[in-house]
Image (cartoon, rainbow, N blue to C red):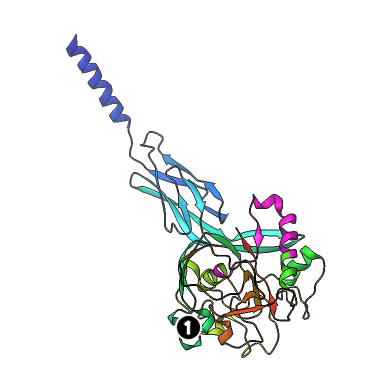
Amino acid sequence: MKKFLFLSLLTSLMVLVGCKKDVESVTVTPESATLVVGNTLQLKATVKPDKAPQDVSWSSSDVTIAEVSASGLVTAMNVGTCEITAFAGDKKAVCKLTVEPMKFTVNGVSFDMIKVDGGTFDMGGTPEQGSDANENEYPVHPVTLTTFYMGKTEVTQALWVAVMGVNPSLSQSDKLPIENVNWNDCQSFVTALNQLLSDQLGGRKFSLPTEAQWEFAARGGLKSKGYKYAGSNTLNDVGWNSDNSGSRLHEVATKLPNELGLCDMSGNVYEWCLDWRDTYSGAAQTDPKGPSSGIVKISRGGSFSWTIKGCRTTSRGGNPPADCKADVGMRLVLQ
């Protein structure tokens, strides 16, 4: 009897083994996809024949752009392209993935927000600035920032009008950056924008960048190559300044972006920041917001009418919050 049972089990096992097939193919659905930063997509892998082992493993060619879980769930991390690969046996299949910036539309005007992964950097007159660094850029000090999103371009006049209904700029055209707005005007704009897009923000809010956020993003964040200006050591490649602008504003995003894909962070118009201007401390800081009071609000980046020296990533400008100027505008942060 025992011998009979043993032979029966052995026969059954041999039948099962005989039924197994090698993997002939694996396919991924979809074969290509586009995601917005922060969004997810569930990929499906199909292994043929059905009797082949169905075990599938997943891999991303660039986890800084997109991550993939053991079940094939893709999470878009940063703007760029990569391949998500499914492996089954000795076969594989690929989904070609494109990750785009976070996009918002208000009253028919769209704008992109680019993810700036958090990290630690040295803020102030670091060595690449050479002798151009001013006294108020010292001491250099370590700053740690939480992840945030920053506007790909300066706020355009078209976006300002879509939110506020009027255009205060002295030189007017939809694709030019907003200018002739003071710090208080920018706060009103941000409040109105948050109200208009509240259903899309999921509890997040737009604001002006802190000075530290602005400098970290201008330097290229974690992708920084240590340039003197935002994206290059040659200012004319990335920014409109007093040497190349013809003494006028230019449309946004007509110069090369920096390492993060942010445009015009050197030149075109100065950009208001949240902080009151004060002297730096040498102490390490985390998500600093500047002093609680002051006389001058920080502005950064230089402008079409300003010197090359003032367009450096570490140069610190500023004006009283009620002042309007033809070369001062703003850029958004979302956090």
Name the image quarter holding the N terminus.
top left
Q: Is residue 261 visible?
A: no
Dividing the picture into quarters, in which one does residue 36 lie? bottom right
Residue identifier under label 1:
129
Between 212 and 239, the one lying in front of the other is 212
Q: Which residues are magenta?
A: 188-212
Residue closest to the far top: 1
Q: Secondary structure at mark 1?
A: helix
x and y percent of residue 289 in the render?
Answer: 58, 65
Quadrant (top left, top right, bottom left, bottom right) of the C terminus? bottom right
- Magenta span contains residue 209: yes
Residue at the location (45% across, 82% down)?
Answer: 128
Q: Residue furthest right?
A: 166
* Residue 263 placement, left or right of 328: left
Give the amino acid type for the residue marked by disc 1 in the picture: Gln
Residue at position x 47%, y 88% in the image: 131
Q: Nearer the viewer, residue 181 or 323?
A: 323
Dominant secondary structure (helix, strand or loop) of the stretch shown in magenta: helix
Q: Can you give x and y, in whole percent of width and height, for residue 331 in the image?
A: 65, 69
Is 259 included in the stretch rendered in magenta? no
Query: Across the whole image, how many numbered discs are drawn on residues?
Result: 1
Q: Picture quarter containing residue 164?
A: bottom right
- Residue 197 can be seen, yes or no: yes
The residue lying at 78 percent from left, 80 percent from top is 170
Q: Nearer the viewer, residue 314 or 77?
A: 314
